[in-house]
Amino acid sequence: MNPPDPQTDLFAEPPPPRPGGVGGVGGVVGTGLGVGERPALHPAVWRAHELARPVATDGRFAIASGHRELDTQLPGGGWPLGTLTELLLPHEGLGELRLLAPALAAVQRRATASRGLMWFDPPAEPCAWVLATLGIDLRQLVVVRARPALPGRPTRPARALLPAADVLWALEQALKSGEVGAAVAWLPARLPADALRRLQLAAQAHEGPVFLLRPASEARQPSAAPLRIALGSAGPDRLRLHLLKRRGPPCAEPVELWLPPVLPELPITELVPPPGPLRPLLPGGRDPGLQAA
Amino acid sequence: MFWIAIHLPLLPLEAFCATLPQAAGDAMAGTDARPVALVAEHAVVQVNAAAAARGIRAGCKRATAQALAGDVLLAESDPAREAAALRAVAHAALAFTPSVAEPDPAEPATVLLEVRASLRLFGGPVALARRLQQALAPLGHRLQLAAAPTAAGAALLARWAPRGVDALHGPHARDRAALAMLLDRAPVTLLPAPRAAIATEMVAMGLHRIADLRAQPRSGLARRFGEGLLDLLDRALGDAPDTRRWTVLPPLFEARLELAARAEHTEQVLHGAGVLLARLVAWAQGRQVRVGRFVLRCLHERARQALVPPTELAVELAEPSVDPAHLQALLKERLGRLELPAPTLDLLLLCRHVVAAPAPNGELFPTRASRAEGLLRLVERLRARLGDAQVQRLVALSDHRPERGSRALPLQGEGAQPALPALPPGPALLDPTQPLHRPAWLLPEPQPLGEAADGTPLLQGRPLRVLAGPERIETGWWDEHPVQRDYFIAEAHDGALVWVFRPRLPPPPGEPVWFLQGLFG
């Protein structure tokens, strides 16, 4: 079936001026259309075989992720603003912070919008100087942790408190206030059915990206987030991303990208095999394993 | 001189309902609420709407009231409680003029303000009266306003509340002649009498209105009813001087509320605390300062053996404010986390930290300063609910020991200095082209790992492949925590990189050799 003629297309509008191609880190990213494509639809509508353009919030569509292979696959050419982005990890420590760091640093450097970052319930202690090396300004970062379980009898024994209740409430308050530049939250596996829906609605008042990091077992559960990516490791310093859900055609192949390296290119010393167990010296000072070393 | 009088006809009842656990609005207005009647000298003096609907009237005895409504709540009127409530109204009125008269026992439940100097600022008596009503609305009292050129005259008019006069700002007399005309129509029962029988005597004599009184010869009135009556009439009409003492605002705020029933849960304390907060806001507005920190003290019932020490709840604001809604929200979050050791009888609210700077301007276009305020308010709300230690910021310290190089400190308000000197990392670490060779995630305690037969570390039973190392960190000999470790970067079975170490000197056999310190995030 032929695609509809643009002259009689009900939704045809004059194409918006395209500010330029896919930008670098921190730049304004333009539309996902290439040269010579048909005139644009209303921004909230997209054709199924094309990537969507996110609805503009104060003139910006998306924030570049800093990894070129990923930006070409994301609708809008970067992480979307004002909606949830769900990242599913088998365990922490895959390189997710190195993946997000360029975008988070760019949010902090933006001239006009709010700049603070808020992290909710990270799984371990973040190392402050590693974050500073990655470009994140520590003075604009707030870490919010859930309350520890109170010792003694609870004040309301009849109502069991969800472990994620604190994090969900704090995240919703931060998104609704609109004062936070970007929010990154680590949520547990089991969430109430409407929690993600409420967060998606609250994120519309928010001007920056929202990242939810959840266990990979949730990949098969439905979610209200418009962008869902499953992360996996493809070797040291290399990350594989499966785009499970996005506003556009399903992504056939996973995206693999190189992360900012952790391993030195020239190792600190040569790669020696791990040393053997140390054996005690025999009396007389002789090492029994000396001839085997 | 131009006086505005604010009369609170239901002050004793409202002051009592403030000590009840439910909202005052429910107790006062709703006809399906619990009936409440205030008793003084064995007779009912005031009733709320629910009690009036059941038929209880002022003047009936206790037993009658209980027969008409079985669940009526009878309470004694307490002059101290009513004085405290009236004081809060006076404090709120001090935001409009510096001259608020001290309460006079001859004019019960009335606050008098001299506003000649403030009329021009607030745009006239009508606008001023409207703003007064708005400012006093949070205190939750029924108000009757009147304005006159004399203090006693305004007080009389406020107590009168005649029909047919504009209810918004009550009877309003611009000059003495108009005041005399208004007062002439007022009934004689308005005048305070030393004996209760005086009003009935006057009515029996045929003197129904004050005009009739003024028409009588003065010597006769003085002989029958006493000099005080004549003196009051003269002061009201402006023929005699009326000197008043002015109220002075206390420099520190302290208010006490005795709860009607023992409060065993923090929700029951919430309403009483809200009433005290409204009084605090009235005082702060009168002094034109903003609240920086306040303390709520709950005084408990004496336990069988010993005195239970009072529970103190201090709420500190990162950004001083007088917004009653914001203060209420913060207090509500804190109260929700508090657990009372014993039933509470009294609440005490203290405020000693105030900030005299003016509030920042509301700007048309939000700038960095106003954004910072908004973020501070959000952080305050999070701290109120989750706890001060749960909202943190990260600080990098100059220490090679990984567990000490990075610290998470509670986020203080603006202007607070960090407790530890946070030195920025050296320039070599900030070079983005060099590989990181440090993990982004650090475990709070190094986790021991198993060891395979050939010495490779095991993570969850699978061997790790060591990719880079060793890097020796040997430091801290001056502390009790010396560190002598060889660090390696290893790859787990699924490709994730981890940071493991083993001590430089081999540990005694039986103790773990390899430890996991960090994950490369």
Image (cartoon, grey):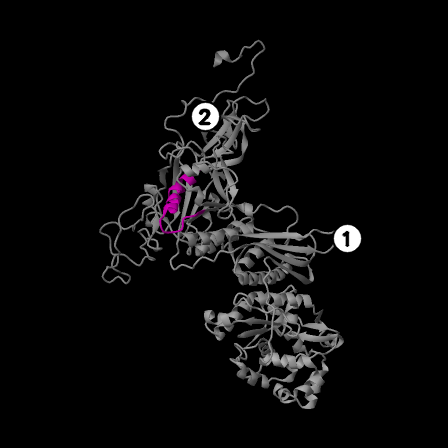
Q: Nearer the viewer, mark 1 or mark 2?
A: 1
Q: With respect to residue A130, does B508 lie above or below?
A: above
Give the distance between the C-alpha atoms of the residues marked 1 and 2, in whole angstroms: 64 Å
- The residue wearing badge 2 is B471
Provide the secondary structure element on which disc 1 rests: loop
Instruction: Give me the chain letter of mark 2.
Output: B
Q: Earlier in the sequence, mark 1 or mark 2?
A: 1
Among the 4 quarters of the image, the one containing residue B222: bottom right
The amino acid sitting under disc 2 is Glu
Residue B257 falls inside the magenta stretch: no
Provide the secondary structure element on which disc 2 rests: strand
B86 or B514: nearer the viewer:
B86
Describe residue B227's horizontal placement relative to residue B380 as left or right: right
Callout 1 environment at 10 Å: few (<14), some (14 to 19), or many (20+)?
few
Q: How many discs appear?
A: 2
Q: Position of residue B149 (x, y in %)?
A: 54, 77
Q: Position of residue B325 (x, y in %)?
A: 53, 61
The amino acid sitting under disc 1 is Arg
B83 or B418: nearer the viewer:
B83
Work out which quarter of the rendered image holds the N terminus of chain A and state it: bottom left
B20 or B82: nearer the viewer:
B82
Q: Which residue is rendered at x = 60% and y = 63% of the image?
A: B275
- The residue wearing badge 1 is B304
Same chain check for tags 1 and 2 = yes
Asked whether the viewer can see residue A91, the reply is no
Residue A109 falls inside the magenta stretch: yes
User: Which stretch did the figure color magenta?
Assistant: A94-117
Q: Which residue is rendered at x = 61% and y = 87% of the image?
A: B211
Q: With respect to residue A163, does B92 lie above or below?
A: below
Q: Position of residue B332 (x, y in %)?
A: 58, 57
Extreme residue toward the right, this view = B305
